[in-house]
Image: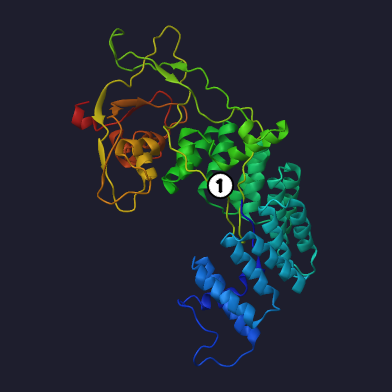
Amino acid sequence: MRFSWLAGIGLCSTLLFGCVSESTIVDSKVPGERPTDNKQIARTRLSLGLNYLQRGETSQARFNLEKARELAPDMPEVDNALAYYYQQVGELEQAEDAYRDALRKDHNNADTYNNFGAFLCQINKFDEAEELLLAAVKRPGYIRVADSYENLAFCALGRKDFDKYQQYLEQALRHNGVKHSIVYNLSMLNYAKGDLEKARIWQKRLQELGQVSPQATLLRYMIAYQLDDKTEQQTTEKFMLSVYPTAPETAWMLSADFSASAPEKLRQQYKASLLGLEPADLVAKPAATPKIKVVKRKTGVNPDSEAFGLTTETGPQLMERTPEPAMSAAASVGTANVVPETTAVPVPVAPPVSAVPAAPTGTTAVTATTETTAQAPATHKVQYGETLFRIASKYRLSVSELQRLNQLADPGDLKAGQVLRLSDARQIPREYLALDGDTLFSIAYKFNLALAQLAAWNQLPTDAVLTPGQTILLHDPAETGL
């Protein structure tokens, strides 16, 4: 969970960017610099220090921040900035001391109250954190009230108080009705509580605000999935595949396994809070008994031949259609409009298989997926910039399986030109019978085909609406004589 750190640590942004070009440790006197007062020089040092910190140059950052303190030891902004520095390098006791020094020097600085409160919340000192954040919003002339209320909401979430979490989010929205992160979190909270209609209302408002991100789009899809709104699902799926084809959220959407997503984690945490348990104590439900799925081949086939077969379908690994409560620490942070980060990168799996319409009475249903003509490649040559996750996703493998096949201890240990072994050769069916909810996008993704190529083989536009049972060719018909 991240919080909104306000101007008390950022100081003047124009000055900050004016000093970016500084690349070495500098002394307090610059040749040719006009004489000026110590506080002005200290503010320059402060901006330099924070800029270096943002770039990860901690030695330069500390040098300039210490110089600022030497020049103006009574400036609370210096203590505020040093506190933030100590947070970033993990020196939490020194960070807390610096925040307290800043408050002693200026007990009316609302930014210090906000930043200190957010810090205390991160180290689980919830009561004092709430007091400081409430003190920030009460300061006269304070204009970032929405940010502090949002921090109060995250703090309430940290102590698993979902009522206060919602209350503070709604108060934050009253003070800033167009902040994307607040609207996103309200939509996600209602999803977690099972109020899908209200979650959809907030989601639509997010769209109206122009918020576009893989996280927000996935939440939109998850709400539609639970409401069984197939039109919305297809619209969202097309958008996700065209705009974020390699995002983890896209893989989760296609697999209908949302367990690693922020909304589903929040749902589980909310559910655990209602039961008085920790989320980890919730016992996973056993997998559903596989259902026999049979599909009728459109061409005549001998029922005794191997072309007649049965496949199993376990269904999507999401949550029940009747929503249950849960939780995730997904929070939007910083003063910029952002949406929560996801921490775990899941292994993409095959897209969900939708229910197949029942065969007419008196007919025999069979699969049409056993004959094959194409074979997936046995190796992959690593291109510059590729990651193990992207390669695994491309070939529908798990990262761990790809590591095992190539004896890679470190997933990041890849070099351009390296040849990776893939899993056992997998056969691509000659044809595929479209299921309810399928699109050319999802079929192309499932079988690792180019969308344009798939559309051309089937003489269909790329955005064609498919009907359940429609036959889709998965190879060039000219090459097979079909």
Residue that appears at 52% across and 50% down: 213
Compared with 183, 71 (above or below) is below
Q: How many marks?
A: 1
**Residue in front for this viewpoint, 466 or 312:** 312
Mark 1 crowd level (few <14, some 14–19, many ≥20, 10 Å Cα): many
Q: Does residue 251 appear to the left or right of 124 in the view shown?
A: left
Compared with 436, 396 (above or below) is below
Percent position of residue 174, x then y: 74, 55
Q: How is the image coloured?
A: rainbow
Residue labelled with disc 1: 216
Q: Does residue 252 appear to the left or right of 39 in the view shown?
A: left
Residue 65 quadrant: bottom right
Q: Does residue 397 show up?
A: no
Compared with 20, 148 (above or below) is above
**Residue in front for this viewpoint, 12 or 353:** 12
Q: Does residue 371 show up?
A: yes
